[in-house]
Amino acid sequence: MNLKYTENTANMEANYLKKLGFSDKSVKIYLALLSLGPSSVRKLAEYTGINRGTTYDILKELQDHGVVSFASKDTKQKFFAENPQKLHKIVESRKGDLDRAQEEIDKALPELQALYSRAGGRPVAKYYGKSDIRYILEDILGTCNQTEEKMYRVYSTQALREYLYEDFSDFSEKRIENGIGVKVIAIGEGGQLRGLDERKWLQGKQSQTTETYIFIYPGKTAYISLNAHGEPVGVVIENDGVFETQKFIFESLWQTL
């Protein structure tokens, strides 16, 4: 019973010390000093199983934290643990460091934010499987609903149309209900106007084999195609730069059709 209690207590003490930044070896040395009292480097090394060089380095580190001191007598040096109350000084020091770090971050934040904005942020790609295509369509509606333009652009391909709205058959109705417009460049035959939409066709030999649907909507571009099993899969790239580039290409092509 006492052994179990001692082990549990030691484990809790070790966890508390680690939260203060103590390494596993620092914990061993510090707890050994508390248990043994004033000890030489040799004695501590033998007790903890840590080599003498590392033991000495750790003792110096604990001295810097103010929780360990040493005394010399007859050319012999012994280390001892200070009152554990001094652990509070480590906490106070950490708080001070964090406060200073917070102040420095606050000062640098405007410039860092400006750099981030100029770069447009790093592209974020999200991948979707067959059963998740609906989420892309929902995102298109949700994103467009939050913008002033309330519209998106799409390259519509014949090969994908029968799969795309399989799990969201009333997508067009929802789009119209929300007052969201769409410009469509249809690749290949088919497709029809449903309301709040404009459609132009792009014909050619390649249109028969093109199997990628591309949605261009505020800040994002979604690509949906068929995988090796003939199932629709998609990827959404979140990046203003990519969006603006694709929008420019789309509008340039739109004017020629």
Image: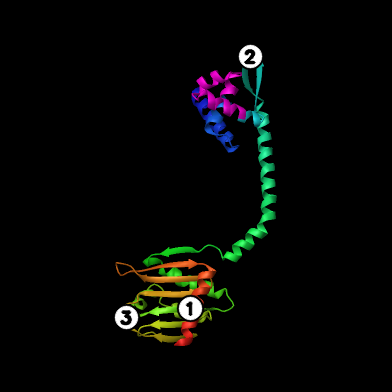
Residue 146 position by quadrant: bottom right
The residues tagged by marks 2 and 1 sit, at their Cα atoms, a distance apart of 82 Å
The residues tagged by marks 1 and 3 sit, at their Cα atoms, a distance apart of 21 Å
Q: Position of residue 71 (x, y in %)?
A: 66, 18
**Kind of residue sitting beneath label 1:** Ile
- The residue that mark 2 highlights is 75
Boundaries of the magenta span: 32-60
> On residue 208, which mark appears?
3
- The residue that mark 1 highlights is 249
Q: Residue at x 50, y 70 (%)?
A: 242
Q: Main secondary structure of the magenta part?
A: helix
Q: In this view, does 144 lie above or below 22?
A: below
The residues tagged by marks 2 and 3 sit, at their Cα atoms, a distance apart of 92 Å
- Could you classify mark 3 by the number of other residues whose Cα lies within 10 Å: few (under 14), some (14-19), or many (20 or more)? some
Q: Which of marks 2 and 1 is nearer the N terminus?
A: 2
Number of callouts? 3
In this rendering, position of residue 63 left or right of residue 254: right
In the structure shown, which secondary structural element does the residue marked by tag 1 occupy? helix
The stretch drawn in magenta includes residue 45: yes
> On residue 55, which mark appears?
none
